[in-house]
Image (tube, rainbow, N blue to C red):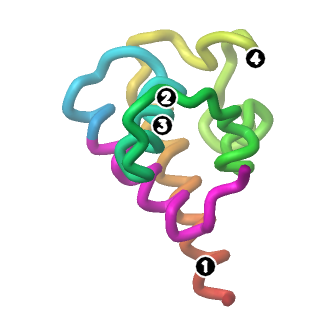
Amino acid sequence: MELPIETQIEVLKRAKENYIKYRVYGLCFHIEAAIFITLNINERVYCKLKYCIPIFTYENAVKHSKAYGDKDNYWWQLRNKNSRIKFLDWMIYELEKEGNKK
């Protein structure tokens, strides 16, 4: 299920705040947690992030924030927080542009 653009932006902003605050795990963890909180889901519901937030892809991460890790695992080294934040910023910016077109 693809989330509405406004919800995707809210999720990514919340994920960024939490990632900066806690700096543990990768982006998938923080984005999934932000989805559960934003949608007020009490139980863990498996959500393929590429379907919920289609812009969140390995290919986009490589192109816009120099991801280099395993496509099916961590896309950056665990300590590489700057590239993760850069990717979150890029996704938020792109979604806000798309949302403004409507």
- Per the image, is 85 magenta? no
Residue designated by label 2: 27
Report x, y in % for residue 58: 74, 31
Mark 2–mark 1 distance (CA, rounded to whole Å): 23 Å
Query: 88 left or right of 94?
Result: left
Mark 4–mark 3 distance (CA, rounded to whole Å): 17 Å
Query: Looking at the picture, which amino acid does disc 2 mark?
Result: Leu
| Label 3: element kind | helix
Query: Label 1 neighbourhood size at 10 Å, few (<14), some (14-19), many (20+)?
Result: few
**Marks 4 and 1, the one that precedes in the sequence:** 4
Query: 4 left or right of 60?
Result: left
Q: Depth check: give the residue in front, 27 or 68.
A: 27
Mark 4, mark 1: which one is toward the viewer?
1
Query: Looking at the picture, which amino acid does disc 4 mark?
Result: Lys
Query: Label 4 neighbourhood size at 10 Å, few (<14), some (14-19), many (20+)?
Result: some
**Disc 2 vs disc 3: Cβ atoms closer than 8 Å?**
yes
Q: Which mark is residue 71?
A: 4
Mark 4, mark 3: which one is toward the viewer?
3
Mark 4–mark 1 distance (CA, rounded to whole Å): 28 Å
**Marks 2 and 1, the one that precedes in the sequence:** 2
Q: Depth check: give the residue in front, 73 or 77.
A: 73
Query: Label 2 neighbourhood size at 10 Å, few (<14), some (14-19), many (20+)?
Result: many
**Marks 4 and 3, the one that precedes in the sequence:** 3
Report x, y in % for residue 52: 67, 47
Q: Quadrant of the C terminus?
A: bottom right
| Label 4: element kind | loop
Residue designated by label 1: 99
Please report the bounds of the magenta region as a residue range.
1-17
- Per the image, is 6 magenta? yes
Q: Which mark is residue 31?
A: 3
